Image (spheres, rainbow, N blue to C red):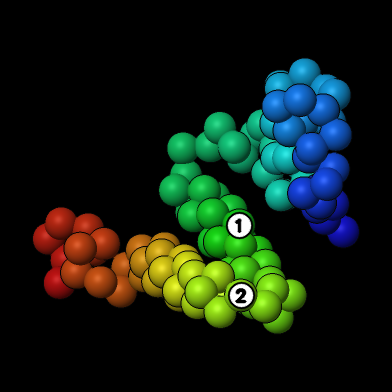
Amino acid sequence: MRTRLRPADRRTTPGGGLGRPPDVENELLLLASGMNDSNENSNDPAVHSEHLQARLAEMIDHMRADISRVSEAHFQALLETSAEVLGGLRTAFQDYDRHQEPAWRKAGKA
């Protein structure tokens, strides 16, 4: 199960951390997101693409959930628009992974 820090947890110390050194904080965030030193330092684009797609999906879900939590219409529209933009970015990563778009195909292949 992935541990997610709530915004209130991030505000417990100046600078937004949890009272841990930045390197420890970053390592904990990587572990919570399914990344670790071995795959974070990987030169395989698929590893990073998968990780980024998961993070984008989390952001999209969070934004869409927040729409029902806030009452201000302009902010709701901002959340929905932002979720749509991030969805497009996630689609771009998926297209890259599948080599669906001509721009992502290897040279010489059509």
Work out whether residue 109 or residue 52 is closer to the camera in this orientation and state it.
52
Q: Is residue 73 left or right of residue 5?
A: left
Q: Element under label 2?
A: loop
Distance Cα–Cα, label 2 vs label 1 = 26 Å
User: Label 2 neighbourhood size at 10 Å, few (<14), some (14-19), many (20+)?
Assistant: few
- Between discs 2 and 1, the one toward the N terminus: 1
Screen quadrant of the N terminus: bottom right
Q: Element under label 1?
A: helix
Q: Are marks 2 and 1 in contact (CB under 8 Å)?
A: no
Q: Is residue 57 left or right of residue 8?
A: left
- Mark in front: 2 vs 1: 2
The residue wearing badge 2 is: 72
Q: Residue at x 67, y 67 (%)?
A: 62
The spot of residue 95 in percent (x, y) is: 36, 70
The residue wearing badge 1 is: 55
The spot of residue 24 in percent (x, y) is: 78, 24
Q: Is residue 72 above or below residue 17?
A: below
Q: Is residue 63 above or below residue 31?
A: below
The numbered mark at residue 27 is: none
Q: Is residue 98 left or right of residue 79?
A: left
Examine the rendering and report whether any part of residue 98 can be seen.
no
| Three-letter code for the amino acid on which mark 2 is drawn | Glu
The spot of residue 106 in percent (x, y) is: 22, 58
Screen quadrant of the C terminus: bottom left
Work out whether residue 77 or residue 53 is closer to the camera in this orientation and state it.
77
Give residue 27's quadrant in the image.
Answer: top right
Work out whether residue 42 or residue 22 is closer to the camera in this orientation and state it.
22
Q: Residue at x 85, y 43 (%)?
A: 9
The spot of residue 74 in percent (x, y) is: 51, 74
| Three-letter code for the amino acid on which mark 1 is drawn | Arg
